[in-house]
Image (cartoon, rainbow, N blue to C red):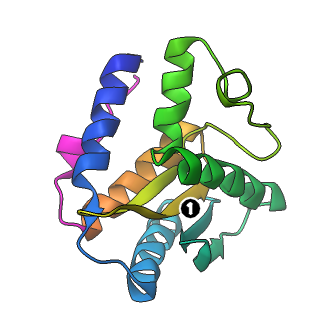
Amino acid sequence: MNLDKDLERIALQEARLQFRSFDAHSAWVLGSRLRALAEQRNLAITIEIQVNGNPLFLSAMPGTAPNNLDWARRKKNVVTLMRRSSYAVGLQLQKDGTSLIEQAGLELRDYAAHGGCFPILLRGTGCIGTVAVSGLPQRDDHELIVEALAGMLEERLEELALDNLA
C-alpha cells in the first residue's frame, strides 16, 4: 500500500462525493443502497448514517455484534471532529508516525482512526454528517461506502476506488 497514493485518492473521493442536498430521504436511499450491497455479498456489517448528530439510518446485518455499532460510533467521532474520512485520518497518522492520543489527546475508547466512516459533504457547505460501516477490514469498510456514494451520486467508481492491494 502506498500511503501517499491512497491519501491522494481519498482526497479526490472527498472532493467528488458531495451532495447538493441531503435529508432523511437521502439517508434512507444511501443506507438502503449499502444494505443491498451487503445482502448481495453476504456481508455482516452495521450501517449508521447521521446528520448533525441526528441518527437517520441504522441497520445491523445478520452476523454482526454490538461491538460493530461501537466501532461505527468511534469512527464517526473522528469524522465529526476532523471533517475527513476516518480512513484518511488513520493513514495520515500512520504516515506521520503518530496517533490520535499523541496528536490530539483523544482516547481510543471514543475515537478510532480506522477506515469505515465517510463525511456527508454538501457542496458549498462542508460536512453535515457521517455514513459509517463496520464489520469488514477497514479498507473494505471504506471502499463499500465509496462504492455506494459513487453509485448514488453517479460518479465513476473506477476513477475513485483505491488501488487493489494484491
Quadrant where the C terminus lies?
top left
Instruction: Say which of 91 and 98 sits in front.
Output: 98
Number of dots carrying numbers: 1
User: Mark 1: which amino acid?
Assistant: Asn
Compared to 143, does 8 lie above or below?
above
Along the horizontal axis of the image, is 9 left or right of 50? left
Q: Position of residue 40 (x, y in %)?
A: 46, 67
Element at label 1:
loop
Q: Main secondary structure of the magenta part?
A: loop
- Furthest residue toward top: 97
Residue 7 in view in this figure: yes
Question: Which portion, as a residue range, is magenta?
Answer: 153-166
Residue 135 in view in this figure: no
Along the horizontal axis of the image, is 109 left or right of 48? right
Which residue is identified by label 1? 42
Q: Position of residue 143 (x, y in %)?
A: 42, 46
Q: Residue at x 62, y 36 (%)?
A: 113
Instruction: Say which of 104 and 79 sits in front.
Output: 104
Q: Residue at x 55, y 30 (%)?
A: 90
Compared to 86, does 5 lie above or below?
above
- Furthest residue toward bottom: 25
Compared to 135, does 111 lie above or below?
above
Q: Residue at x 28, y 70 (%)?
A: 152
Q: Residue at x 41, y 73 (%)?
A: 30
Instruction: Say which of 1 and 5 sits in front.
Output: 5
Quadrant position of residue 59:
bottom right
Q: Position of residue 95 (x, y in %)?
A: 49, 15
Quadrant where the N terminus lies?
top left
Q: Residues within 10 Å of mark 1 (few under 14, many from 20)?
A: few
